[in-house]
Amino acid sequence: MARAQRSSQSNAVIGAGAKLRGRVHGDGDLLVEGAVEGDVAIRGDLTVEATGRLQSNVEADSVTVAGTLEGDVTARGVVHVRAGAKLTGDVRGESLAIDEGAEFAGRVEADFELPAELAELGGARAGGRRR
Amino acid sequence: MATTVIGAGITIEGDLSTDDDVVVQGTLRGKLTARDGVVVEAGGSVEADIASGPAQIAGAVTGNITSTDRVDLQNGAKVVGNVKATRITIADGAQFKGSVDMDV
């Protein structure tokens, strides 16, 4: 029952207690509740739940982190770091949201339009934010 | 339940181990260890040795299957490898090449 619900919500789930050492790639969403060591490259949304732990470079459409992620993040959409999350690595995305209570150490490279006067100074590149 | 699902379109290359269930609708290459059940659905493909509890196979498996419980090769299954289990069923329409060890 729970299984049917899960799989319709999310294309792939690494369940809590599951350990994966290897690569994940393909089309579809990925939900991580367990531990993953290895690179993730998907055309779909990646969600790391509070129990989830990733030691991997990540490439996905949108990335939501509520657990632990050690590695660089490349997103074609939004990167959202939720309260309680621990993110160590560089983030490259369309936009980035960091909730209060999240831990983040790394550089941010977001593609967005800067006001003309700033763009002249530094180009369209956001500075790193560290905590 | 913390079921692990490998959705259609997703490919995992590596070792996957869990205390719970695994459902494969996509592709897994490497090694699969589940304390609980493994389901390989039609369209799913596993190129790995499987060690698990009860296993239901309706997709393709290339590799040895070792189960502490039963193994059901269902209609449409294509299994190349040896199967070791306490009980095994091979349904009409299942393709199987390998040996069976039922620990008699």
Image (spheres, coloured by chain):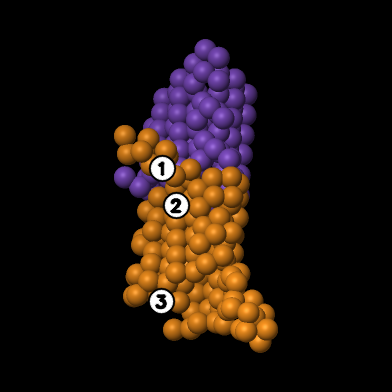
Q: Earlier in the sequence, mark 3 or mark 2?
A: 2
Q: Amino acid at mark 1?
A: Gln
User: Residue at (36%, 62%) from the top-left corner?
Assistant: A50
Which residue bears the numbered disc 3? A103
Which numbered circle lies on residue A9?
1
Image-based side of A120 in relation to A107, left or right = right
Instruction: Relative to A81, say whether B32 is above or below.
Output: above
| Residue that mark 2 sits on | A31
- Residue at (51%, 57%) from the top-left corner? A62
Tell which circle, 2 or 1, labels the residue nearer the N-terminal end. 1
Q: CA distance from mark 2 to mark 1?
A: 10 Å
> Which residue sits at x=52%, y=36%?
B25
Quarter of the image with the N terminus of chain B is top left
**Which chain corresponds to the colour purple?**
B
Which shade is chain A? orange
Q: Foreground residue, B76 or B72?
A: B76
Q: Above or below — where is A103 with respect to B41? A: below
Q: Is residue B52 visible?
A: no
Query: Mark 3, chain letter?
Result: A
Q: Disc 3 marks which amino acid?
A: Glu
Of labels 2 and 1, the one closer to you:
1
The residue nearer to you, when weighing A74 against A33, is A74
Q: Is residue A120 visible?
A: yes
Q: Are marks 3 and 2 on the same chain?
A: yes
Against A98, is B70 above or below?
above
Please identify the residue farthest to the front as the structure is shown: A116
Q: Secondary structure at mark 2?
A: strand
Q: Is residue A55 above or below residue B30?
A: below
The quadrant where residue B48 appears? top right
Furthest-top residue in view? B92
Instruction: Check if mark 1's residue and mark 3's residue have beta carbons within 8 Å.
Output: no
Q: Quadrant of the C terminus of chain B?
A: top left
